[in-house]
Image (cartoon, helix red, strand yellow):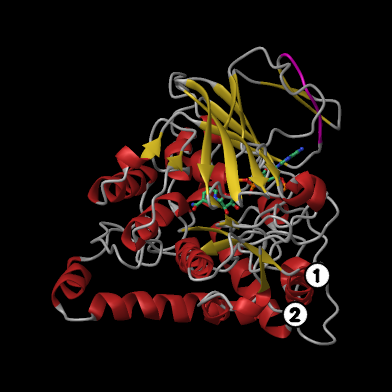
Amino acid sequence: MSGLLSAIRLQQAGIDFAVVEKNADVGGTWLENSYPGCRVDSANHVYSYSFRPQDWPQHFSPQPVLRQYFTDTADEYGLRDRIRFNTEVESATFDEASGMWRVQVNGPDGAETLVANAVISAVGQLNRPKMPDIEGVGAFAGPAWHSARWRHDVDLTGKRVGVIGTGGSAFQFVPVIADQAESVTIFQRTAPWIVPNDTYFQEVPQGKHWLLNHVPFYAKWFRFNMFWSAAEGLLQAVAAGDDWNRPEESVSELNQQFRESLLANLQEVLNGHPDLIEKCTPDYPPGAKRALIDDGKYLRTLLRDDVELLTDGIDAITEKGVRTADGVEHEFDVLIYGTGFKASSFLHPMKIYGLQGKELHDVWRDEPRAFKGITVPGFPNLFCCYGPNTNIVVNGSIIFFSECEVRYILGCLAMVMQSNGKALDVKPEVHERYNQWIDEGNAGMAWGQSGVNTWYKNASGHITQNWPYTLLEFWQQTREPEAQDYNLI
Ligand code: NAP
């Protein structure tokens, strides 16, 4: 999504570029995640490029529709010829003498070095599947796979299926595979917060289509209103209040109200099943971890006789299935890992060598940081999309963020071209000051206050993923680069 966007903007600016893509097609996350039930959880009228609106059939599109949107975007802008498919970047090295990046790629024709004035990373935060740190992973004798590597060749009909994880991916595929499998057993470590949305699977009504297509400016107003009410509005509900001390429940009075409304929904759908209500009640504040959205479908699936939710810790993966801490071995025909991604390993596994030959990951030492999520001191003309601290938690749209980032990056390139220098390097003190401000912001949010396990944090508990302020603030931060923030080299 960010890569196509970068290409479009570079093309419009008349700047020569090449796109390197490890997959055989465009689409990124919407190409790789093809698990049953996969669909977007930000409303499509905001989860789309501002310059490429579409008459979406549903409010929240399923994966094939989104994949088509990005495929169409690539075709419409004639980008395919500019993309080297099936090609992976292995390393990028900044040459101080020439001020150029030498990018080592490996593709169908073997290894090659591309030389460029600037490098834009558009690899995302949620791309590299993470297998759980559980003894015996790999020992299971039957088919086993990660949700982002779905085995469509395995028919689940009549199969006993074990699922590890209850994050956004498992939450979506469990209700679908429950209709096929003989039984589904879900291993839950942490209960997710579930936000009900009656429109989640619904078609956009005909009247709304008519308004979007015929009333001047209605579509723009509709999109803006969604941003404003859903994103900025909810932010306050996950911000910490002063003197509020209920770390396992909520972080403010408003957050407590939010909690109670979510619990009321849970209790209503699971009415008469106190055991399930207890298992599904999170012991951390709403907003501390990514909340999941549907119309109650997942919770209703848990009520089926052939679906079981287990909360006992996992001891080991065995040849036959999963052994829980109580010593019971649960036997399965198929095992599916919905265990997420290596979110904190930004730009992994690429090696990026900046000034004095320093490697980016050695500099970060598991604490990825960037100025505005985009530039890193010592790595001139290296720009990140969806870099450190640019993930949004309560709605909004990550595409909006990418648009802000790419506009800023184009501004940086213009600044270099209009100067006598070769490259821009963000000043360390500017970067430091900015990250202090980010840390302060995150410390005041539910995800910064709670000790709950989440991909928003790195291994040491530092929030490396999230943007803690408003969408408007990010738009202002990235409107245009300021010369005083950078050294020209
Ligand atoms: P995730 O949210 O990181 O969830 C991973 C799950 O695996 C969690 O329930 C986690 O438990 C569990 N897990 C990991 N290691 C484990 C272990 N050793 N033992 C037991 N359980 C373990 O991953 P995801 O579901 O793939 O979703 C990732 C993100 O992708 C989402 O948050 C969302 O941002 C995005 N996504 C979006 C959509 C959408 O737009 N609709 C759909 C899917 C995903 P803990 O909670 O205890 O860590």
* Percent x, y of residue 353: 71, 44
In screen coordinates, is 432 left or right of 227? right
Residue in view at x 28 percent, y 64 percent: 53
Residue 449, which numbered label?
1
Give the residues in magenta.
314-319
Residue in view at x 41 percent, y 62 percent: 47
The answer to whether the residue bearing label 2 lies less than 8 angstroms from the nearest atom of ligand 1 is no
Distance between the alpha carbons at the discs numbered 2 and 1: 8 Å
* Percent x, y of residue 100: 58, 48
Q: Residues within 10 Å of mark 2 (few under 14, many from 20)?
A: many
* Percent x, y of residue 183: 56, 28
* Percent x, y of residue 432: 79, 71
Q: Which residue is mark 2?
A: 240
Q: Main secondary structure of the magenta part?
A: strand
The answer to whether the residue bearing label 1 lies less than 8 angstroms from the nearest atom of ligand 1 is no
Q: Quadrant of residue 84?
A: top left
Q: Considering the image in quadrants, where does the C terminus appear? A: bottom right
Residue in view at x 47 percent, y 63 percent: 406
In screen coordinates, is 94 left or right of 122? right
For the question of whether residue 92 can be seen, the reply is yes
Residue in view at x 38 percent, y 79 percent: 224
In screen coordinates, is 401 left or right of 46? right
Question: What element does badge 2 sit on?
Answer: loop
Q: Earlier in the sequence, mark 2 or mark 1?
A: 2
